[in-house]
């Protein structure tokens, strides 16, 4: 049995290429069709042998994130330990690049990383399906952070089916000052749709065709997020961010998840640089990040 003193998991951020929000369920969640796409903006979660559990954080949002049991990564380590009958002895350290409360599932990525890293540190060899179940228990987006690539999520987002896609897509992300609360954005979505018939969400055929063809132009046309209107309602400045990105030649732009990060699809590296420079110069966002997708799911490095 190999006993390691330290392991690190690298976990990608996601953007939703499609996020179609169905009716509110009795459990407070919404039935979704979400086409998740992992991009190579990653957090690293390091797990080191220790007595008891602790958490330190460096990078994006380091001053604002909790370092106790209210952090999803901490909860992931405890859940895995409890389920496996071991003590949660681990010093977790998260090196963050994924914006916090940005709609890119950074907290979910950290939880997925903690699951994978602790599983290796404690030599548990938990079957993949079980890790996915723990992930779903922790949050709707956590299973996808383990899965990576491009995948359709149904249910509340936790049931995943891989999607066939060709080639790489290039993205520019416009990061905002301050986050948006996911529950508040969903609540605003309900408020805006009150009194309307809400159909069951369906996977977009044109999106699937664009992914199969590896065609960025078609993909740009098919980007769709039902949470975009409520996110803009709560943060009107996002409309301007989307306008600037598109005015400066992005193929398409969309609010990422519940926002406030905006994702712009571009042709290639050079185009990404042009759009990133334009967004920075316009002053409409706090920072920009360039990335490509699909990226692999959580993995040990
Ligand atoms: O699953 P997670 O804890 O990440 O979800 C955060 C919040 O987002 C939920 O409490 C809920 O308000 C909202 N949500 C939802 N429907 C989903 C996923 C999330 O309403 N399918």
Image: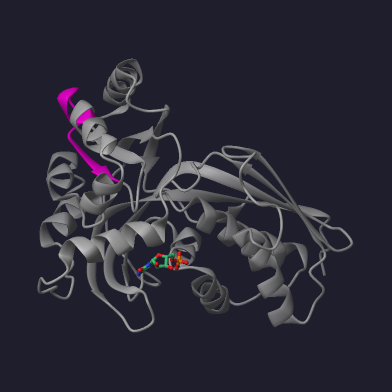
The residue lying at 24 percent from left, 66 percent from top is: 190
Q: Report the side of 48 relative to 207 (left or right).
A: right
- Image quadrant in which you'd find residue 153: bottom left
Which of 220 and 169 lies nearest the eye of the viewer? Answer: 220
Hey, which residue is sitting farthest right in the picture?
A: 51
Total residue callouts: 0
Which of 300 and 181 lies nearest the eye of the viewer? Answer: 181
Q: Report the side of 49 relative to 46 (left or right).
A: right
Magenta span covers which residues?
245-255
Q: Position of residue 5 (x, y in %)?
A: 83, 55
The residue lying at 48 percent from left, 41 percent from top is: 99
Q: Is residue 248 magenta?
A: yes
Hey, which residue is sitting farthest top in the picture?
A: 281
Residue 79 visible in the shown view? yes
Q: Position of residue 53 (x, y in %)?
A: 80, 61
Which of 257 and 13 lies nearest the eye of the viewer? Answer: 257
The residue lying at 48 percent from left, 49 percent from top is: 12
Q: Position of residue 244 (x, y in %)?
A: 21, 26
- Image quadrant in which you'd find residue 49: bottom right
Which of 85 and 32 lies nearest the eye of the viewer? Answer: 32
Vertical arrangement, residue 286 with respect to residue 32, above or below:
above
Vertical arrangement, residue 231 with respect to residue 292, above or below:
below
Residue 267 visible in the shown view? no
The residue lying at 31 percent from left, 36 percent from top is: 170
Q: Position of residue 103 (x, y in %)?
A: 39, 50
Quadrant containing the N terminus is bottom right
- Image quadrant in which you'd find residue 232: top left
Q: Report the side of 149 relative to 55 (left or right).
A: left
Q: Report the side of 64 relative to 23 (left or right).
A: right
Locate ligand 1 by image quadrant: bottom left
Colour mapping: one colour
């Amino acid at each position: 049995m190999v006993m390691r003193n330290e392991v690190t998991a690298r976990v990608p951020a996601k953007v939703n290429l499609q996020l179609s929000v169905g009716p509110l369920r009795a459990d407070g969640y919404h039935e979704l069709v979400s086409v998740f796409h992992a991009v190579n903006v990653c957090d690293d979660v390091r797990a080191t042998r220790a007595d008891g559990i602790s958490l330190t954080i460096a990078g994006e949002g380091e001053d604002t994130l909790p370092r106790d049991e209210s952090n999803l990564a901490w909860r992931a380590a405890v859940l895995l330990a409890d389920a496996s009958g071991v003590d949660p002895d681990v010093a977790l350290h998260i090196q963050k690049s994924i914006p916090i409360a940005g709609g890119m599932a950074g907290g979910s990525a950290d939880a997925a990383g903690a699951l994978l890293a602790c599983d290796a540190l404690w030599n548990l060899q938990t079957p993949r399906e079980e890790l996915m179940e723990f992930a779903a228990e922790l949050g709707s987006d956590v299973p996808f952070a383990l899965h990576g690539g491009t995948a359709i999520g149904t249910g509340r987002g936790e049931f995943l089916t891989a999607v066939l896609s060709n080639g790489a897509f290039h993205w520019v992300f416009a990061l905002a000052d301050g986050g948006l609360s996911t529950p508040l954005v969903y609540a605003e979505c309900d408020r805006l749709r009150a009194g309307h018939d809400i159909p069951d969400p369906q996977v977009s055929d044109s999106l699937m065709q664009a992914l199969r063809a590896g065609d960025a132009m078609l993909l740009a046309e098919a980007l769709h997020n039902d949470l975009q209107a409520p996110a803009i309602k709560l943060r009107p400045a996002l409309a301007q961010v989307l306008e600037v990105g598109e005015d400066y030649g992005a193929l398409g732009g969309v609010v990422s998840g519940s926002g406030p990060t905006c994702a712009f699809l571009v042709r290639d590296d050079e185009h990404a640089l042009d759009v990133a420079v334009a967004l920075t110069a316009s002053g409409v966002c706090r920072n920009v990040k360039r990335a490509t997708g699909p990226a692999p799911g959580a993995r040990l490095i």
